[in-house]
Image (cartoon, grey):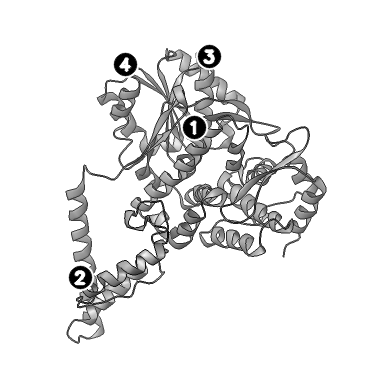
Amino acid sequence: MKRVRRKNDRPLLHTDDPEETLRRLLETRRPIYEQADIRVESRDEPQEVMVEATLDALTDELPRLDATRRAAQKKDFAKAMTHLHLERIQADQGATHRETVHVALGGRSYDILIGAGLVEEAGAHIAKVAPGAACAIVTDENVARLHLPALQESLSKAGIRHKTIVVTPGEGSKSLSTFGRVCDEVLAAKIERRDLIVAFGGGVVGDLAGYVAASVRRGSRFVQIPTTLLSQVDSSVGGKTGINSAHGKNLIGAFHQPSLVLADVDVLRTLPLREYRAGYAEVVKYGLIGDKRFFEWLEADAEAVFHSRAEQICAVAVSCETKAAIVGRDETEQGDRALLNLGHTFGHAFELLTGYDSARLVHGEGVAIGMACAARFSARLGLCAPQDAERVARHLASVGLPTEIRQIPGWRSDAQAVLDAMYQDKKVEGGALTFILMRGVGEAFIAKSVEPAEVLGFLNDELARA
């Protein structure tokens, strides 16, 4: 059951009692299973552990050999298995699994395509949504070095005129000065209203390029090609665009929906582990706000989401489906969409107080600490069980994410400074704080007018944690 707790893609388990159905299926299949010559017990272990157990079972069936020869035979087995696996991949090329998530917004609707090899196909997909359009590609130096040639070649093959604008990596590029420079370069490239601006990068590039698209010629079309896990599951979807101010994060911007999102999981292979973990925090968020089953799948299979293309596609698709449904109900964050900010009231305050220094704290790490804080704050207020708060922190920590304020390098700010920073949050209404809190895993809700004294007391206790 742990392994099948994921998106609803097991037709035989579409019953009122899937566990009982699974038991019946097991009994029906048992006579076939019992014909196996070699058996390996399926345990709740990482994939590579089970591979080792299987190789051990195979080598146990060999004639008695000395340890050196048995180790060599085991290595030969592994090579043979790898060779067969590669042959299968080569045979399956051209039939790569893809997911499409539709964001239903009437005349502003669009699709999110999720899968492998989408950067190489970007030109063809863009030509379909905008025949005859030219493109201004906005990217950063890191993405340009790793992936830009493939995108440029794809656009050229599709006959799309394109101009590339490169910015410095990091939150510093979400500034008025960089915004102004990019706008000027887009106009100098003679990009017209019916042409496209392509955001090719992570959340910083997506937010910046989207705001440029919302502003140039009073609104141009744009395409998101997110290159980080965080941007694939969150910032590229929903039309939030913007830049930072000295007063806080994302305080200058506009809602401007893309025409298309291409989430290529292959580019995630070049992502540093720290950045991948940061994106995973946003994946966890979707389970916590309203999908307990998804959270349970992540608990059981987080290792696969870090290493398996199929599981990555699934995690991105489920996350995007959840966000698309919420955005479809509340495009401009007048109600339910605020749920997507679970952990962000805390997290944005931490980012502001660290000066958006990515060496100390990246956005996903701030969100991870923020979600753990939101869960503990909910438990402190008697809204959820302490065990639920512990469960949230335990899972985040299990993949290497921080869960406490004291884990931020060089942290010096006191509780009052954090509280003051929270008052720059976009959800503040009439000078009153709004938090996203939890009644349990998968049961987040919007809590308005939270008492500052309660928050201050909680923050003081958090900072005093040993």
Residue 328, percent from left and from top: 50, 33
Amino acid tagged 4: Gly
The residue tagged 4 is 132
Label 3 sits on a secondary structure element that is helix
Residue 237, percent from left and from top: 48, 35
The first of marks 2 and 3 along the sequence is 2
The first of marks 3 and 1 along the sequence is 1
Label 1 sits on a secondary structure element that is helix
What is the quadrant of residue 66 in the picture?
bottom left
Seen at 36% across and 54% down, the residue is 308
Is the residue under label 3 in contact with that under label 4 (CB below 8 Å)?
no
Q: How far apart are marks 3 and 1 (CA)?
A: 18 Å
> Viewed as shown, does residue 235 lie left or right of 402?
left
Amino acid tagged 1: Gly
The residue tagged 3 is 218
The residue tagged 1 is 206
Give the mark count.
4
Work out whether 177 lies above or below 347. above
Residue 310, percent from left and from top: 34, 51
Label 4 sits on a secondary structure element that is loop
Q: For residue 408, say whether it is visible.
A: no
Label 2 sits on a secondary structure element that is helix
The residue tagged 2 is 76
